[in-house]
């Protein structure tokens, strides 16, 4: 800390003590340096790609669609079996419709948790606002 002698005539000091300000700025700088690498960290994920070739045309409802995960880990779209690539294609198509149709996800209680976790947020992958999870 800086130490200064008071003036000989007993008047007030005209200098401001900047040591606390510098201490605060150094603490903030250290916190910024520590948190920046954490904020820029990212994780790469392999998401299913939409079907482009040899994909059967699967109709979807303009108002509400139901995605079911059966106990045998099979995906059903409005009662019809589909693959993961077809699911990605259907999600891609439905989120681009105005107004966006509702998507009801109904996993069977006996379905595997890993498969459920993979498909529990299909709406969030495509930024869907109409995703509903049913039990």
Image: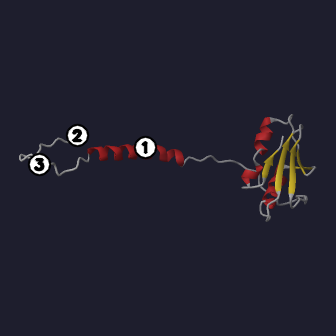
Residue 17 falls left or right of residue 39: left
Residue 115 falls left or right of residue 56: left
- Mark 1 vs 3, N-terminal side: 3
How packed is label 3: few (under 14 Cα within 10 Å), some, or many (20 or more)?
few
Residue 7's label in the rendered image is none
How packed is label 1: few (under 14 Cα within 10 Å), some, or many (20 or more)?
few
Considering depth in this image, is 10 or 76 the residue closer to the camera? 10
Q: Position of residue 16 (x, y in %)?
A: 22, 50
Residue receiving disc 2? 1
Q: Position of residue 15 (x, y in %)?
A: 19, 51
Q: Give the alpha-carbon distance from disc 2 to disc 1, as whole Å.
A: 22 Å
Q: Give the alpha-carbon distance from disc 3 to disc 2, as whole Å.
A: 22 Å
In the depicted structure, whether residue 51 falls above or below residue 20: below
Q: Secondary structure at mark 2?
A: loop
Residue receiving disc 1? 31
Considering depth in this image, is 104 or 81 the residue closer to the camera? 104
Considering depth in this image, is 32 or 104 the residue closer to the camera? 104
Residue at point 15%, 48% (across, down): 12
Q: Secondary structure at mark 3?
A: loop
Of circles 2 and 1, which is in front?
2
Q: Give the alpha-carbon distance from disc 1 to disc 3, as whole Å.
A: 40 Å
- Mark 2 vs 1, N-terminal side: 2
In the depicted structure, whether residue 60 falls above or below residue 30: below
């Amino acid at each position: 800390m800086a130490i200064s002698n008071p003036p000989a005539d007993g008047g007030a000091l005209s200098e401001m003590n900047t040591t606390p300000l510098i201490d605060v700025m150094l603490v903030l700088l250290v916190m910024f340096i520590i948190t920046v690498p954490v904020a820029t960290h990212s994780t790469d994920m392999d998401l299913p790609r939409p079907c482009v070739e040899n994909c059967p045309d699967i109709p979807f409802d303009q108002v509400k669609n139901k995605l079911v995960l059966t106990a045998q880990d099979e995906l059903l779209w409005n009662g019809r079996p589909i693959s993961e690539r077809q699911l990605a294609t259907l999600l891609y198509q439905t989120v681009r419709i105005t107004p966006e149709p509702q998507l009801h996800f109904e996993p069977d209680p006996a379905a595997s948790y890993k498969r459920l976790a993979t498909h529990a947020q299909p709406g969030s992958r495509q930024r869907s606002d109409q995703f509903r999870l049913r039990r």
